[in-house]
Image (cartoon, helix red, strand yellow):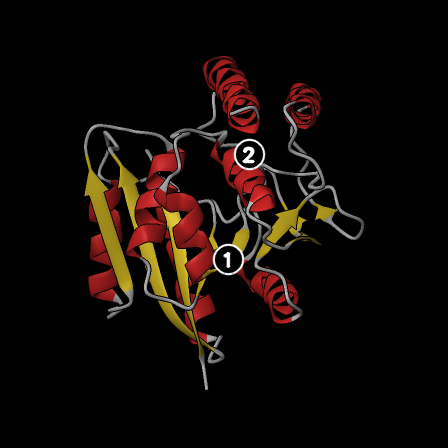
Amino acid sequence: MATSLTLVIPVYREASRLPASLEKIKAFIRQSPAFDMEVIFVDDGSPDNSVVVIAAFAEANALACFRPISYTPNRGKGYAVKTGILAATGDLILMSDTDLSTPLEDVAKLKAAIDAGADIACGSRAAAGAHIGVKPPLRRRILSRMFNLLVRAAGVRGIRDTQCGFKLFRADVAKRLFKTLRTERFAFDVEIIGKARRLGYTLTEVPVNWDYSTNSTVRLVSSGSRMLLDIARIALRRFTTAHE
């Protein structure tokens, strides 16, 4: 019997690179009979025609499992993922970035961790066995390491790569965690992992394949500053809750 899997993909200003990703998703669906697929694209107030590209591709390829969701204004990646997860119907929910920096085929590794007892399988570029093909620029690597140090300082430990956008959840766990998500932008993974730890869920870090996308929509200065502010808020909420 096929496992029901919902793939949640947040979308923002992705019209130019969506066609290549949509072809890869279509191929994965047709080559993966072990999964009963649902694909939810959450268009996060894109100023381009991303949602039109998705809808047209789904119609042209008779992909009834594609479910585009759109809203305005832009709220952030965390809000988009939350929207998709709360709408998901699969027993397992996989979140992935639009550029598919980690190939969808790696979900088999994450599912093996779930089958072994994990509630959440976190794709990791830092775990032993991970393979980085196209590496990010040096400044991004430096900022990533600084961010990880701040995450640990905020009390979120045990996961070396919180920001990899490839994570697999048991559906009931994902819905419980995301229902009360407060971090709407890029640091939402940190809030989710910290909350999962406090609630006693089992998290497993799984090495994956990953390639840096040169067309990333993450802006180093504006997004980095916002992420640091979000980390400070997460740490403050954690401290306040612990001392109530």
Which residue occupies the foreground of this view, 207 or 48? 207
Which residue occupies the foreground of this view, 31 or 231? 231
Which residue occupies the foreground of this view, 184 or 238? 238
Classify residue 71 by image quadrant. top left
Mark 1 Cα-neighbour bin, 10 Å: few <14, some 14–19, many ≥20: many
The CA distance from mark 2 to mark 1 is: 15 Å
Q: Is residue 24 visible to the viewer in this orientation of the structure? A: no
Q: Is residue 138 left or right of residue 3?
A: right
Q: Secondary structure at mark 2?
A: helix
Q: Position of residue 2 (x, y in %)?
A: 45, 81
Identify the residue position indicated by label 1 in the image.
Answer: 169
Identify the residue position indicated by label 2 in the image.
Answer: 190
The relative height of residue 72 versus residue 120 in the rendered view (above or below) is above
Residue in view at x 53 percent, y 19 percent: 236
Indicate the amino acid at tag 1: Phe
Residue that protrudes farthest toward the right in the picture:
128
Q: Is residue 58 left or right of residue 199?
A: left
Q: Position of residue 96 (x, y in %)?
A: 47, 49
Q: Position of residue 202 (x, y in %)?
A: 63, 55
